[in-house]
Amino acid sequence: MSDTSSKPQSRRDWLLTDAPLTRHQARLGAFYQGWLTFRANKLAMLGLIILILLIGMAIFAPWLAPQSPFAQNLAGRLQPPSPEHWLGTDALGRDIMSRLIYGSRITLFIVGTVALIAPVIGLFIGTVAGFAGGWVDQVLMRITDIFLAFPKLILALAFVAALGPGIGNAVLALALTGWPPYARLARAETLTIRNADFIAAARLQGAGRMRLLIRHIWPLCISSLIVRVALDMAGIILSAAGLGFLGLGAQPPMPEWGAMISDGRIYILDFWWVAAMPGLAIFIVSLAFNLLGDGLRDVLDPKGAKQ
Amino acid sequence: MIPPPTPSDRAAARRRRFRSIGGTILSLVLTLFGLLLVTFIIGRVMPIDPVLKVVGDRATQAQYDAAYVAMGLDQPLYIQFYRYITDVLTGDFGRSISTGQLVVDDIRRVFPATVELATLGTLIGVLVGVPLGVIAAARRGGIVDQIARVVALIGYSMPIFWLGLMGLLIFYGILGWVGGPGRQGIIYDGMVPNVTGMILADSLLAGDWDAFRDAFSHIILPASLLGYFSLAYISRMTRSFMLEQLSAEYVTTARVKGMSERRVIWGHAFRNIAIPLVTVIALSFGSLLEGSVLTEIIFSWPGLGQYITKALLAGDMNAVLGGTVVIGVCFVLLNLFSDLLYRVLDPRSK
């Protein structure tokens, strides 16, 4: 690779060089190599494509949906899938496909918010515990253990019951019950980094605790947290749908997928599509997240992938 | 050569072990304390007025105030919390507003149904999941491994309540193979004497085969459903434990000595994963107790999950928190059980 600098470089060579000239090049190169590994995993690519389609669906919902998700037509209720209503209509004659398309916005909102809040809480608590050590560590980890010892869904149920049903409270409940595994992970990472030479070097240069934590420790914890988040996304979707199914998440007439299954429950034996379609949507999306998560783990955490 | 342990070494080891068991118990107590603290806080921040629920909205201000004082709500929070803890420790979760019964009696009535369901589910998960995981590891990349992978992937991606509905549609609605929602057909209701609260066991004890068959036809679908999720997890863990063992040197030694592959796998490697596997099974059982919430709703199964959810929608906080505490305690105890089992069975952890 040493003589490549004399030849005119392709962009690929520039990215894959062994001797990056700038930090920027090194970073992009590492990213590109990860992408190559990821791209080789067909299932992970499938997951990525499904999720891109989902995001596109959420953005362009008004253009894609054949009807309004709220438009009722009691004369045409509980109609089976047909060319007019591809996925049939529900008990109020609403077009199920339109509702599914708009529902993708709610799903993405819930998953996105929980996947943002819970790891940040976990990262903060875990790194502070690992970095500070001593009694701070003891107290924070004890709290984490207590939350870990709880059944998650039940705790989320109790939270939503106390705060009142609704989409915001569902997000809050899922985030409040979801952070402990991230805290453990971040603490474990911090413990391995804490005594590294580069931390000692930064400290000797006069870096304060806050700076060490934010500039040196957080960035190194993030990649394993991302893997974990990607693997947890499907679980978040399923929990959110479960809350919606129980009537504790998004409230009617919002087209939340879990709540839509709940609407179709009483018709299951005669009008199966009302409950079947939203369930299929949940399944496809969480499958996509699982596939993506596996692929990301292979890229970012090769050690964990072998198990 | 490692010198043989001296008496003082042994005493030190005993002290260490004692301390670690003491630590386990301490952490158990702390966890239970935390559980109660969290449920207490949840019970306080809720927007539902507990006094109004008791006295009704036609009560005069004087009646309201009297009930307010009687419920101890005029006391400082820490005294309320202290009372809450002592109540719970004596098994008093208060009275359920929706059923009018003591919550503890309600739980005693509905909990066996949940345990029955979760036990059968775990049993299915173990009986299918463990062999599946072992074979998947023994023939890595083979057809069984692929199937196990797909089964687990689907299990992790499928909403349990939806799969339950589809199961009802197919096996009850279309094929008619299983009994419908509920625990029993209506003619069998109350036919077998209630001993354990688990109908399968009770009908066996009474020797009533028809009742047993009926109960079985009702439980098999929800139990298989829970069993599926349990086996998705158990087979994955079994596979990874086995892979770890099979790459160990003692396995190579055994193979070199000419031992049959079957004995290597089941006699050597599998024996060594038995202990971590028990932990996995205990955890899986705990998560089925929790996972039964959604399943019980779908199958109108009169268990703890359905009880909690109904209470939740009725704003019956005593019942919700009582149920949450019971499931939480089961969780903690299962964790403790697997932890202790590990210590007892695994000589290395001494």
Image (cartoon, rainbow, N blue to C red):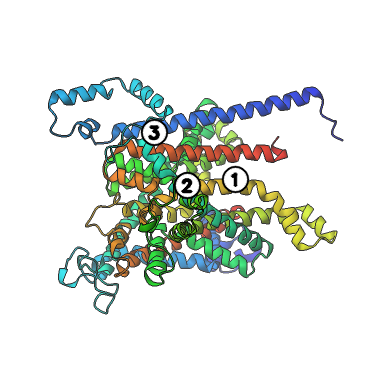
Residue at label 2? Answer: B115
From the image, state whether disc 1 or disc 2 is nearer to you: 2
Instruction: Give the quadrant of residue B335.
Output: top right
Q: Residue furthest right?
A: B1
Q: Is residue A63 above or below residue A289?
A: below
Name the chain under label 2: B
Q: In this orientation, does residue B294 appear?
A: yes
Q: Which mark is residue B38?
A: 3
Q: Which quadrant, please, contains the N terminus of chain A?
A: bottom right
Neighbor class of circle 3 (other Cα within 10 Å; few <14, some 14-19, many 20+) is: some
User: Is disc 1 in the same subunit as disc 2?
Assistant: yes
Q: Is residue B170 above or below residue A231?
A: below
What is the crowding at mark 2: few (fewer than 14 residues within 10 Å), some, or many (at least 20)?
some
Residue that appears at 44% across and 64% down: A48
Q: Measure the C-alpha gap from mark 1 to mark 2.
A: 18 Å
Among numbered discs 3 and 2, the one appearing first in the sequence: 3
The disc, 3 or 1, on the residue closer to the chain's N-terminal end is 3
Look at label 2 and name its amino acid: Val
Quadrant (top left, top right, bottom left, bottom right) of the C terminus of chain A: bottom right
Q: Secondary structure at mark 2?
A: helix
The amino acid pointed to by label 3 is: Val
Residue labelled with disc 1: B279
Q: Position of residue A118 (x, y in %)?
A: 41, 44
**Circle nearer the viewer, 3 or 1:** 1
Task: State the count of labels.
Answer: 3
Task: Name above or below for residue A240 compared with residue B80.
Answer: below
Q: Position of residue B345 (x, y in %)?
A: 68, 40
